[in-house]
Image (cartoon, rainbow, N blue to C red):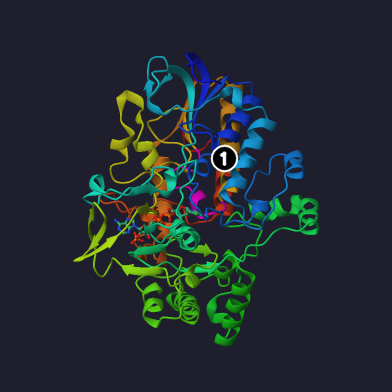
Amino acid sequence: MTIGDEPAGEYDAVIIGAGFSGLYMLYRLRELGLRCLVYEAGSGVGGAWFWNRYPGARCDSESHFYCYSFSDELLQEWTWSQRFPEQREILSYLDFVADKFELRSDIQLDTRVTSSIYDDASRRWTVETDRGGTVATRYVISAVGGLSAANLPDIPGLDDFEGRWYHTGRWPHEGVDLGGQRVGVIGTGSTGTQLIPVVAEQAAHLTVFQRTPNFSMPARNRPLDPETVAGIKATYDEIWRRAKASPGGMPLPAPIQSFDEVDEAEARRRYEAAWEHGGVLVLQQFNDLMTNPESNEFAASFFREKIASTVHDPDVARRLMPTSYPIAAKRPVLDTNYYETFNRANVELVDVKATPISCITPHGLRVGEHEYELDILIFATGFDAVSGAFAAIDIRGREGARLVDKWSDGPTAYLGLAIAGFPNLFTINGPCNPALLTNVPVSIEHDVEWIAGCIEHLEREHIATIEPTEQAEQQWVQHVADAVDGTLFLEADSWWLGANIEGKPRRFMLYVGGHDDFRRRCTEVAEQGYEGFLTVR
Ligand code: NAP
């Protein structure tokens, strides 16, 4: 679709977002013969990978399973170049998918959905956009992404800053020349940890403003040689079978032993071996990491020892060591040379927990009484996760009920896929879903296929609307809360808990029960005639 052809009229389905989720949803709904329209705010497809173009942006899942599994042809045609794919390569992949399956003709780019309102009488949704377009549709599928609403902290003085500033999630397409510049980075989560080593190499001076240190482990990225690629392509069936049967959506061995089952020397040997191997396996050593404080502290101490042995200045090393929360209670991070970067002469670490940022000045950032002069300020401050992108759209369900009101105590959804009171609205990777704790494309494929299966059922049975019952939704929400209750996940101020956004209700927004368990439950619900759902013919 080209700009200027403003869509109008009736559709069977409107999909909001053209990232991993939206592209595949379109593909599946077209197969059902539905007339579909995808709205995408960006000027290209790709979602998270379209927007997050900051230096060093890369995925923490290995490339050969951070992709779609649905098409054998696609799996054989596409070749990944590195163990952990760069943003650019993932975006090229999604562009390739959009072209291969001829998806673009149903995608309206540069168009942000502003409202989606259900009409009880006609059983249609009216979807409006910031370009003035209005369409009617029977189904709305949210593919907005759980990490798409950028969080720009409200630090006084930003408007007066005379340098340039950027949020990593809105990085300029033309890139930013950091050469010779004094750069400040706020934030040391997954994004900051990837960004900081690359910025340090380019900038004249880098000041890192750290509020909470993160636990990071080496990615040990490397190019994929032709033999490895051939091995992967020959065994894809097995790779996906294992990924879909695993808690994390990854074809990696899940831990089967608890920390108590081995002695400390053996535990250390396992951590050392995994550390050398690199990647997320480091935290896959024991099955009680998030339930046994002793197991968790052993892993945390191991990480702190690694920091101490890497960072030359003991005081800087100490400040980089997380001590205030259990390991993996915030999203753990993969890095390339993160801790080593703090040995560089042009890098300075400022602890803004001990002395908070007071304001942004015309020439930099003031922390307590000290002013740090900066030419460029980078916010690696994350996202208003899960609910943020929904809050940006005026969504109203039956009898005009607003989604923001329903979610005033935190976002909830039955299976993370549908919401009581909002007929024929589906949410890929919605709240109370495990997706953002897993290898996301595997979870996305599951959700898309479940939603497509549900819509196929509705079409075949001539059912006009479907929505969860309040009771089924509440039971699922309770199950999600029970699953996380008593675990160490609740002991950190993470975005999983909404704790990174001031005023956001503190509620664990994701399902920790695992992808495998979730998949099983969703299958059962469908097989039992969409148990927990209310349908109207
Ligand atoms: P994040 O994990 O929320 O980290 C934001 C950072 O900014 C934190 O260090 C936070 O400190 C800091 N911060 C926020 N407001 C601040 C303020 N007012 N003053 C000082 N510091 C402030 O965000 P993210 O790093 O963008 O990552 C978000 C998620 O995106 C990740 O957890 C991951 O799921 C995904 N992601 C994945 C990859 C990958 O696969 N490699 C890469 C990037 C992102 P506190 O901790 O004290 O709040």
Measured as percent of width and height from the top left, residue 71 is found at 72, 39
Taking the image as four quarters, which one is ligand 1 found in? bottom left
Q: Is residue 460 above or below residue 347?
A: above
Q: Is residue 173 left or right of residue 490?
A: right
Q: Is residue 359 above or below residue 6?
A: below
Q: Is residue 262 left or right of residue 470?
A: right
| Residue 289 in sight from this viewpoint | no
Q: Which quadrant of the figure has residue 183? A: bottom left
Q: Which quadrant of the figure has residue 68? A: top right
Span shown in magenta: 428-439
Instruction: Residue at the far top: name it.
Output: 9
Instruction: Residue at the far left: name it.
Output: 369
List the residue tagged with mark 1. Answer: 20
| Number of callouts | 1
- Nearer to us in this view, 509 or 160: 160
Q: Residue at x 35, y 35 (%)?
A: 392
- Nearer to us in this view, 1 or 331: 1
Q: Is mark 1 within 8 Å of ligand 1?
A: no
- Nearer to us in this view, 304 or 509: 304
Q: Is 436 colored magenta in this rendering?
A: yes
Measured as percent of width and height from the top left, residue 451 is found at 56, 34
Q: What amino acid type should be assigned to the residue bearing mark 1?
A: Phe
Q: Residue at x 33, y 34 (%)?
A: 403
Measured as percent of width and height from the top left, residue 75 is found at 73, 44
Q: Is 523 colored magenta in this rendering?
A: no
Magenta span dominant secondary structure:
loop
- Nearer to us in this view, 272 or 422: 272
Measured as percent of width and height from the top left, residue 490 is found at 37, 62
Q: Is residue 257 left or right of residue 310?
A: right
